[in-house]
Image (cartoon, grey):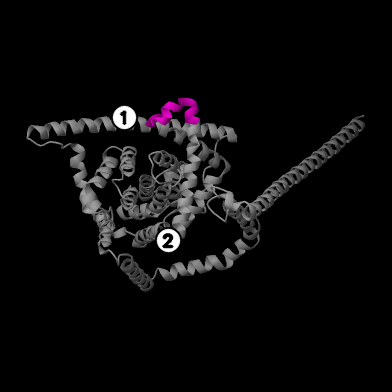
Amino acid sequence: MKMERGQANTAYEISDANISESTLKSKSRTSNIKRRIRKASHKGLNVGIHLVVAGYFAYATYHYIDVENNECDSLKPNELCGIQFCSGYGLLVLLLAFIYLGLLYFQIIKPKVGRTLHRNYIYPLGKRWKKFSRTRLVSGIMLIVLIILLAIFLYFETKEDRNKLRSLLAPCLLILAGYVFSSNRNAINWRTVISGIVCQFILGILCLRWDVGRKIFECLGDKVATFLSFSDEGSRFVFGDAVIDDGIFAFAILPVIFFFSFFISILHYWGVMQWTVMKLGWLLQQILGTTVCESVTSAANIFLGMSESPMLIRPYLTKLTSSELHSIMSSGFATVSGTVLAAYLSFGASAAHLITSSVMAAPGALAFSKLYMPETEESQTSSKNIQLEKSEDSSILDAASNGANNAIPIVAGIIANIVAFVAFVAFLNGVVNWLCFLVGLEDIDFEWIFSKLFIPLVWTMGVAYEDCNIVAKIVATKSIINEFVAYERLGEYIKSGVLEVMLQLTNKHSK
């Protein structure tokens, strides 16, 4: 009997094992079928999207050719006439070319050819060049060539007005001050400092002196200004037309920060912001030789504020060296974040000039931060062990809502600080004015005295002596109150025609 029971139990166990094995196989087949269906659906959706885009582009091309041939003379404004790469059909061509070239590279070229090419050729050559270029002889020759090229450029640039050379005094004095007040002069990496300044200089030439570069940034600035202007619709709906038309600061200007933060949060949820920042950070790292974290946050400050950009590397903040933390803070103060840029545009500032100054400031900030506080420790982070933080939002709607909500403390902080600092400066003006009045001096206040301190610096920036008072007053306002009040006054000077275009440029880039 025991033997029969044992055989029966064994038979039951074998039967259960067969059932469980068949169940697992059935589940595996089901999951494989689901995976294939999901994959096929994904491919079908991609093909459908590309077909829709191709169809739309084909019809847009047909419409463009038809308008070009038949109706161009009667159209006003003739945005559809001729290839205009900043608007109309030309902009569509550029956008599609950018998107599909990117897809071609990242989906086909990089996986099949790029990695092998980088591993076998680009990386070894880059390593050899790095080693070769850092020898004293080669570094000295490169520095001499750089000085000669700079001298040739300045000779032709200032041929008609040698007074322009005066603007060289400002960067020279700032470099000298950085060296004098450096935390460790012996540890200064002059390659990083010089590379950052040269990079900033080249960006300035490309953006301001080269016609194509200037047009690109003007186009980009116009598109940014147009995009941010849509926030007016939300402001009008909430606050009413009268408040917006009157240009009340808290209601007409600051709400644009909600809209921009809303949009940035969506990009962060999709991973677009992390990807863009990582690529720009890698570029800065290769050019300047700075570490990954400080390069990434410097690039992020072009788009984000100094409180948001460090959050991209939040897990690594405790591992950063003092020099890296100093670089992150310096980059935050040097660049114009996208959220604040949106408010500046409402004062009438040029978007192209603000974007240009922010891009130029990224390498310059890293260079001067490494001059004031050079690296003396070994960095614990590298491109191999760093990963940017992903969005914690559960959906795109959650990301959008949180983005708008995250702007509340920014807007509240701006309002609180402006109210407090403007009131405090008014109090100081009253005290100084009263003290001066008692000794027979009129029209002298705290801002007037403080602005006089900036006249030498403004003069070294190339501003004509007769205009130094106005520009110095704006820079002083930015320093003792904040940049919002300074930009508001700058906008008033621009509208009244007090400041010429060149002075406006100088003042914006000085910030």
Q: Which residue is mark 2?
A: 210
Q: Which mark is residue 4?
A: none
Nearer-the-camera pick, 241 or 80: 80
Residue sitting nearer the eye, 256 or 73: 73
Residue ID for mark 1: 419
In the rendered view, does 248 fall on the left or right side of 222? left
Q: Check residue 278 for magenta coloring.
A: no
Identify the residue shown where x is 21% and y is 43%: 451
The verdict on residue 238 being magenta is yes
The residue stretch that appears in magenta: 234-251
- Circle 2 packing at 10 Å, graded few (<14), some (14-19), many (20+), is few
Classify residue 439 by image quadrant.
top left
Residue type indicated by callout 1: Val
| Quadrant (top left, top right, bottom left, bottom right) of the N terminus | top right
x, y (%) of residue 69?
64, 56
Q: Quadrant of residue 367?
A: bottom left
**Where is residue 11 shown, x and y percent of the image?**
89, 35
In this orientation, which residue lies closer to the viewer: 357 or 22?
357
Q: Position of residue 430 (x, y in %)?
A: 18, 31
C-alpha separation, residue under disc 1 versus residue under disc 2: 42 Å
